[in-house]
Amino acid sequence: MDIRDRIKTFEDAQAATGRTETPDFSIFPEDMQEHFEALYKMYVIIEALNEGWKPNWDNDGRKYYPWFYMVTGEFTWFGTKYGLHSAVGGHGSRLQLKSPELVEYAVTQFKDIWKKIQLK
């Protein structure tokens, strides 16, 4: 079964990765809690979508990530980028996916979480 058919929610990703405990984000200042919780959720979702694949920074393999366009009142996915030798600022290796199709899925299925990462 395609991973996109199995991972529809954060809870699905938790079950797939075995990361069933959600950390206590109250250790962060109140105005940062939502951002760090969303970032954690996306790390778990991407781990599940990648099905064990991890970016290898010792080779030239492509590592894909979403690129967002933000303008007043609008948050949209602008496209998929890839890196060969480096991580782009704001898109560390834990936010890299193994294919552009998974990037498109992650952005469309989990747009609200991405938005909290970028805007909170």
Image: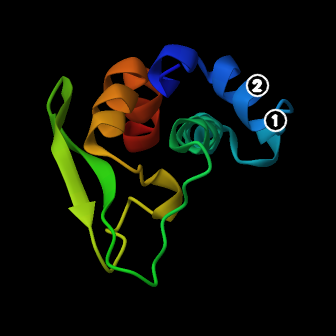
Report whether 35 appears left or right of 33: left
Q: Nearer the viewer, residue 55 or 113?
A: 55
Across and down, in percent, residue 68 comes to 22, 41
Residue at the spot 86% in from the left edge and 33% down from the top edge: 21
Image vertical order of residue 82 relative to residue 109, above or below: below
Identify residue for label 1: 18
Dot 1 alpha-carbon crowd within 10 angstroms: few under 14, some 14 to 19, many 20 or more: few
Q: Nearer the viewer, residue 118 or 81?
A: 81
Amino acid tagged 1: Gly
Identify residue for label 2: 15
Q: Quadrant of residue 10?
A: top right
Q: Residue furthest front?
A: 1
Q: Residue furthest bottom?
A: 58
Under tag 1, what secondary structure? Answer: loop
Across and down, in percent, residue 11 comes to 69, 19
Under tag 2, what secondary structure? Answer: helix
Amino acid tagged 2: Ala
Residue at the spot 31% in from the left edge and 68% down from the top edge: 88
Residue at the spot 34% in from the left edge and 77% down from the top edge: 86
Cα distance in 3D space between marks 2 and 1: 5 Å
Image vertical order of residue 25 relative to residue 55, above or below: above
Q: How many marks?
A: 2
Dot 2 alpha-carbon crowd within 10 angstroms: few under 14, some 14 to 19, many 20 or more: few
Residue at the spot 43% in from the left edge and 23% down from the top edge: 110
User: Contact, CB < 8 Å: mark 2 with mark 1?
Assistant: yes
Image vertical order of residue 24 relative to residue 62, above or below: above
Report whether 88 appears left or right of 33: left
Across and down, in percent, residue 45 comes to 57, 35
Report whether 15 appears left or right of 107: right
